[in-house]
Amino acid sequence: MRILCDKCGGSGWIRDENGVLDVCNNCWGLGYVETTSENGLDAQLHVAMSRNSIISILAGMGIYYAIVFFLTRNLKLNFIYTFLLIFFGYYAGIIANGIYLHLHERHLRSEKHSRSS
């Protein structure tokens, strides 16, 4: 399984001590490294959680903007109200992500508790 290189952050390039760009010696310029089987499960869980976190943000924002669109379709709003409604869509995504992360942590805690019992 491939994961982003920790050293270069996925760019494939790092700066040496003189500030000159050089190829990352951890991933050799690819931007990712292959994981071994011992770290594979943790890496897969991390990738899945990151992907689902992004999906939860986009879903929260999408649902918020759909509701705003349908509720305000026939309303005449001034610029300030329209801006505020658009601006708060970002927070709707953050709230959806917070809910996802909370439920995910709860699920992990219950799995650990059931394994230790």
Image (cartoon, rainbow, N blue to C red):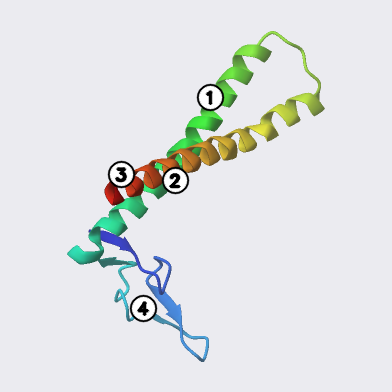
Please, what secondary structure does the residue beneath circle 3 have? helix
46 left or right, relative to 71: left
- Residue drawn where x is 30% and y is 58% of the image: 42
Q: Where does the image place residue 96, in percent across and percent down from the top left?
A: 54, 35
- Residue drawn where x is 69% and y is 8% of the image: 74
Q: What amino acid type should be assigned to the residue bearing mark 2?
A: Glu
- For discs 2 and 1, the disc positioned in front in the rendered view: 2
Query: Gap in Å between the C-alphas at discs 2 and 1?
Result: 23 Å
Q: Which residue is mark 3?
A: 114
- For discs 3 and 2, the disc positioned in front in the rendered view: 3
Q: What amino acid type should be assigned to the residue bearing mark 4?
A: Cys
Q: Which residue is mark 2?
A: 105
- Residue drawn where x is 77% and y is 13% of the image: 76
Q: What amino acid type should be assigned to the residue bearing mark 1?
A: Ile
Q: Nearer the viewer, residue 17 or 116?
A: 116
Query: Gap in Å between the C-alphas at discs 3 and 2?
Result: 14 Å
Please, what secondary structure does the residue beneath circle 1 have? helix
N-terminal label among 3 and 4: 4
